[in-house]
Image (tube, rainbow, N blue to C red):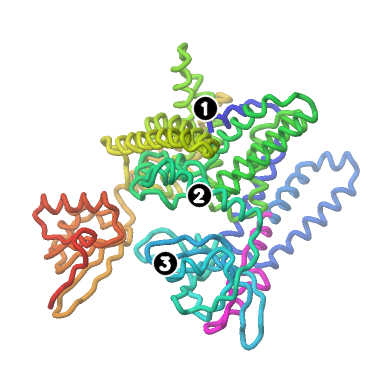
Amino acid sequence: MLFESTLSSPDAKGSAPFIRLIIPFTAGILLQYYLDMNVYAFLLVIPLLIFSWLYQRLRPDQRFRLRAWQALLLWLFLFFVGAFRLYMANLLHHPASYPQFYTQGDIIQLEITEPPQVKTNSISGVAHLKYILHNGQIISPKGKINLYADKRLKDSIRWGSLLYTNNTLMPMRNQPESSFDYQRYCADRGIYHQVYIPFSGYHPVGLAPVNGIRLFLHRAAGFCTATFNRYVGPGPEAGMAAALLIGDRQGLDKDLVKDYSNTGIVHVIAISGMHLSLLYASLLLALSWLPAGQRGDLLKAVLVLLFLWGFTFLTGASASVLRAAVMFTATTLGQFVLARKSNIFNSLAASAFILLAVNPYLVMDTGFQLSYLAVLSIILFQPKIYAGLHCKNKWLDYLWQMAALTLAAQLLTTPLCLYYYHQFPTWFLLANLVAVPLSTIIIYGEILLLLVVPVPLLAGWLGRGVHGLIWLMDLLVKWIGELPLALITNIPCNKLMLVLLYLALAAMALYWYHRFREARLAMICCLNFTLLVLLYLQWHPVSKPYHLKHYTLHHGKRLVNVTTSLPDTVPVKKFRTNYILLSRNPPVDIRQIAALYDFDTLVIGTGNSKRRIEQWKNDCYVLTLRFISVPDQGAYVINF
């Protein structure tokens, strides 16, 4: 993002038509998303077309007097276009969608459309429904489902596999102990069902042809991962290397990811616009030797776009990377083909318009929202923050430039993060100043490592260097995450607070750039109202439901399975149970459990992180509580 912020400034001149287009288009998408209007509602666009035709028939002087109505007609038309685009993107509105035909017991043919991921007890992937045998009729439906299979099938079910099964398609469900709406998340991606394939519950057909470009990108990613495992070394460092460069997070340690998330720098290990910025800057430097002129500039543009979009699809084409790719495409075409600079606001709005036109469901993607807010925040606030302090020393000036960039990006992203996650990393500035430069060096080192693979000796030296840098970065991030008050949690934030915070930030931007006294007054009022809402939510907290699974064993013995966080309130009388089972890595404290339950034995199950298990064991020793650690001692058998 540091490089992105230098592409233009908020004071850049030039036409920005896409700003006027993206607002009604996005509003139409959002209205359709929440209301799911019937197709007949879109017939209202016909009067708009009639009025538009009549407007064009008017004399020029009449059209000039009614030009405001022309703008209103355009906005309404784009509003309906956005709503209709989402309507068409909804699988359930497609005449061939599989839920209209499928019934339990039907035989279905599936095609595995991506490399399955190997998990602890199973393999998982996405499958396309090719055919349904329904009431003796073969139907070619539209849709895809999540597929889970017995882990023993990892060598049989792979990318491109075709198989028949009559196993029941089960609807996507939310986990009762989770606040995350997984069902809605999958629906936004066109997935409404899942199927489990046991070891002998399917009939293989063969392999479907795989797209050549996707296969090449998959093999390229496999080459990168194998290289890192060989030269960076097995362990968390190799997994971090793959995550930093190609976005492969399968080898990441869960506790390490939590450290990066808690310090506010998860964007470092999630492929984002920052990574594409580094690649773009490197490409411009590497191609600077090409001669200037029409042919040279055209060749530069072609090579830059090939590498940019190749890297975008290599890393999975996340929303933030797509945003950066579209923006850099516009910048490249403007600089090398059209020989003109683009307005940064227009480029930002144009990239959003294009991406939403292709996939309107991106508007609800958290990465999409945070990516655009971060870039917009940098454009608006970084110049003002940077101008607030002048450093004569070159290195101090560069450090202040990074700090100003981090502070600016945090302004517009913080309200949304508070609304989604209800936490705030207090040491985010220090973490960014440490991790961003280190990760930049590491990424360049990884690229160089891939280039020198034919020279094993040199690759070995580079691999050890990358390993050491990743180890140092992880160590520093962990240290920052353990500083006092490193993470403030359970911050109440509802939709009203979210709106008030953004209104305050908008007023602050108006005051900074135009010195409107009314804007300063509006900002103060919004912040005061925000404080009042915060105090109200603090005094009248919304009770969050939590779910515990209670089991009654033989002879009346009881077991409570804790898989999620526990309530903060302490009951007047403790709940009595014989066993407490901790599974699925719940974020709980042993003292909290002891305050809520009167129990005989605490059982630490599998599936918990090593760090959390060690912390639980230490707490049990301190509190003299009886516990069993299944990962350390093996299966725990209860005798009656």
Q: Amino acid at mark 2?
A: Thr
Q: Residues within 10 Å of mark 1 (few under 14, many from 20)?
A: many
SS at badge 1: helix
Q: Is residue 85 magenta?
A: yes
Residue 138 in percent (x, y) is at 66, 82
Q: Amino acid at mark 1?
A: Gln
| Rendered image quadrant of residue 432 | top left
Q: Residue at x 54, y 53 (%)?
A: 364
Residue 599 in percent (x, y) is at 13, 64
Q: Is residue 322 above or below residue 345?
A: below
Q: Is residue 148 visible?
A: yes
Residue identifier under label 3:
122
Rounded to the nearest angstrom, the CA distance separating label 1 from label 3 is 47 Å
Rounded to the nearest angstrom, the CA distance separating label 2 from label 1 is 23 Å
In this rendering, position of residue 392 left or right of residue 27:
left
Q: Which mark is residue 408?
A: none
In this rendered view, identify the residue nearer to me: 209 or 129: 209
Rounded to the nearest angstrom, the CA distance separating label 3 from label 2 is 28 Å
Residue identifier under label 1:
382
Stretch in magenta: 82-110
Residue identifier under label 2:
366
Q: Amino acid at mark 3?
A: Ser
In this rendered view, identify the residue nearer to me: 75 or 449: 449
